[in-house]
Amino acid sequence: MKTATIRDVAKRAGVGLGTVSRVINGSPQVSEATRQQVLAVISELRYFPNPIARQLSLGKTLTIAVVVPFFTRPAQIGRLQGIENTLAESDYDLTIYNVETVKRRDICLHEIPCKKRADGVIIISLSPRDEDIPYLAHADVPVVLVDANNPLLSQLNRVVIDDVEGGRIATRHLVGLGHQRIGYISDYLETAFNFTSSRDRYAGYRSALLSAGIEIRSEYHLQGEHGRCEAYLLALQMLNLPVPPTAIFAASDTQAMGVLQAADELDLKVPDDLSVVGYDDIEVAEYLGLTTVRQLLYESGRRGVELLFKTLLDPTTEPTCETLLTELVVRNTTAPPKCSG
Amino acid sequence: MKTATIRDVAKRAGVGLGTVSRVINGSPQVSEATRQQVLAVISELRYFPNPIARQLSLGKTLTIAVVVPFFTRPAQIGRLQGIENTLAESDYDLTIYNVETVKRRDICLHEIPCKKRADGVIIISLSPRDEDIPYLAHADVPVVLVDANNPLLSQLNRVVIDDVEGGRIATRHLVGLGHQRIGYISDYLETAFNFTSSRDRYAGYRSALLSAGIEIRSEYHLQGEHGRCEAYLLALQMLNLPVPPTAIFAASDTQAMGVLQAADELDLKVPDDLSVVGYDDIEVAEYLGLTTVRQLLYESGRRGVELLFKTLLDPTTEPTCETLLTELVVRNTTAPPKCSG
DNA sequence: CTGTTAGCGCCTTCAT
DNA sequence: ATGAAGGCGCTAACAG
């Protein structure tokens, strides 16, 4: 049996089809009598307005698209949660475009903002390269970048995290504890996805070392694919250096867990033999007692949606760039080095 | 500047609007010459077919809706990953309806399958109550249930997990190690969301104890809100009993972590003083060396999509119920009880 | 091969 | 207050 349409309802209720439409949309200019009449038929026929038709007519989709790389990673989940919860307070639906390949990345970045499947697009952690800009500039729906940036994109709404400062804070903390040999384990700094976080945190790391007058040793920076196991292997490698670091700053909590594993493997006590600092403050960090740099994941998602809504309501709003602060959370994986130096 | 429509393209290319449509949809019956011509105009005008209009015309949305409670929980992420990855191989988009309140639950269960925003719906972990059935029965798109069940719903496609068996396996393992006093810490067995997993696992737990001839003591079963901290508190309570259990089976890995914390708090060594078994085998379980019951999270999502696609292709397909197996993964948190008994 | 036309289901003037 | 008609952008069936 075919789904009832607005026409069926109109016919059955003996009214014009425009009247039904008015009832659906709560127009005040319809007599209480006919309203009740129509309402009755609607529920009798189990009528639901077809959202697609309405979207076409209205020119709105009432959905927000989110483009996010590797959405299962805890940090992304945190952002998505902020987005979802904020959206849930509204009438908007949420569609997710997960990105795990470069090809998909390009498709999403170039097409999602143009095909008008959504009224707005939030792009997470994928900083547009210069060649992506034309596409974004021609987007016909508002776009906001979360945890992504591009100096040329001052005309886009952005929520950015000061990762340079975050890296600096983490490193400075270790320096403050007396560490001189501090390692940094991260994702590859240069990837096709153009992630900036590891890069920025590295900049902060270097900056902190420099201002502390500590020499930057290249063997103390190891990069690899993102992941706990990968970080574990890198940490093993670094800790097996002739002169190993006394502290390691990991580009994420997940990677910090790998470092912790490596330390355990080598019978190094944390924090006595090795200090470890993570990044993100994902949920498990508290459980592990991991010292880490907290970034406002949930908040970044929420802000992204709010920014989007603001421009949705008033398209003439000037694009803004909100910077979210980071904060050091000291727990039990950091301490002064045992043997000074 | 308004977005270009198919009409603009047609006019600019000096062809009929149907021809443009054919080019877009790769119809073979277009001369190579005009095709090129049209293609040129399309890229010149940066034309993108409006998906909404196409959806209306085609009667398909090319999107799949997923209704999922508390989507940030690791187990749900695992299922979502299976769904997303499978969908990514297709042309379908994914829209997510997160459920965190009963109200939202009802809306999603009753309306999503009827409003035709998606060509198919996957419902995760929300077992329809009897009063929900009429709505599901009147759905005008295929629905598949993942990790959810209802005996009355034999006409629905389902992917179910044998949680009773899972609970049995876990408990039997502990019994096999010689434990006689085995606790169970879980979510509330009865909730408005009608989650069945904790209930089923409890049934398995009881069944295993019974067949081992072990008395079931009510003080060895504690329930509370889902979560690590809540489980931590429950575990503290249970371990402070005059005669505490020597082993605890937790309804999820997350809750098992809480138990581990409690043990640590009470200076109980795991597994020497206390054995702990979790459920799910989420990623952190391996890191923690947690003995747990693995369920095929990713696989359940994948299967759900496959089932959906199958009925999408052939609506006359008989609904099937696939049962996914569970498997015990023994790691380092279980051992024979120290003092026999 | 290609132009034209009739819907898809709904919303919104415009008259009445 | 309400019915009728035009249009949202596209697809598909129908002529040519």
Image (cartoon, coloured by chain):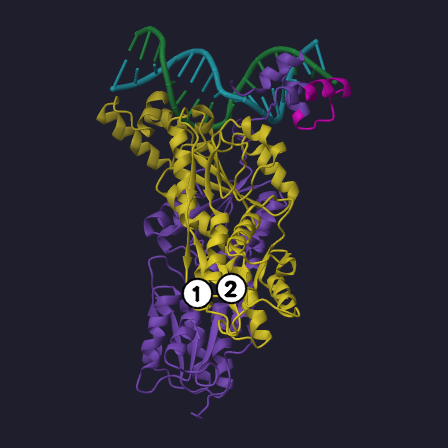
Chain colours: A yellow, B purple, C green, D cyan
Query: Which is nearer the eye, B176 or A36?
Result: B176
Q: Specify which label sits upstream in the sequence, 2 or 1.
A: 2
**Disc 2 + disc 1, Cβ < 8 Å:** yes
Label 1 packing within 10 angstroms: few (<14), some (14-19), many (20+): many
* Mark 2–mark 1 distance (CA, rounded to whole Å): 9 Å
Per the rendered image, the range of residues in magenta is: B24-40
Q: How many marks?
A: 2
> Can marks 2 and 1 be said to lie on one chain?
yes
Q: Which residue is denoted by mark 2 in the rendering? A: B161
On screen, A176 above or below A133?
below
Q: Amino acid at mark 2?
A: Ile
Q: Which residue is denoted by mark 1 in the rendering? A: B197
Q: Disc 2: which chain?
A: B
Secondary structure state at the residue bearing disc 1: helix
Q: Disc 1: which chain?
A: B
The verdict on residue A255 being magenta is no
Q: Which mark is residue A5?
A: none
Say which residue appears at 43% left-offset and 69% top-offset: A332
- Left or right of A32 on screen, residue B210: right
- Left or right of B215 on screen, residue A221: right
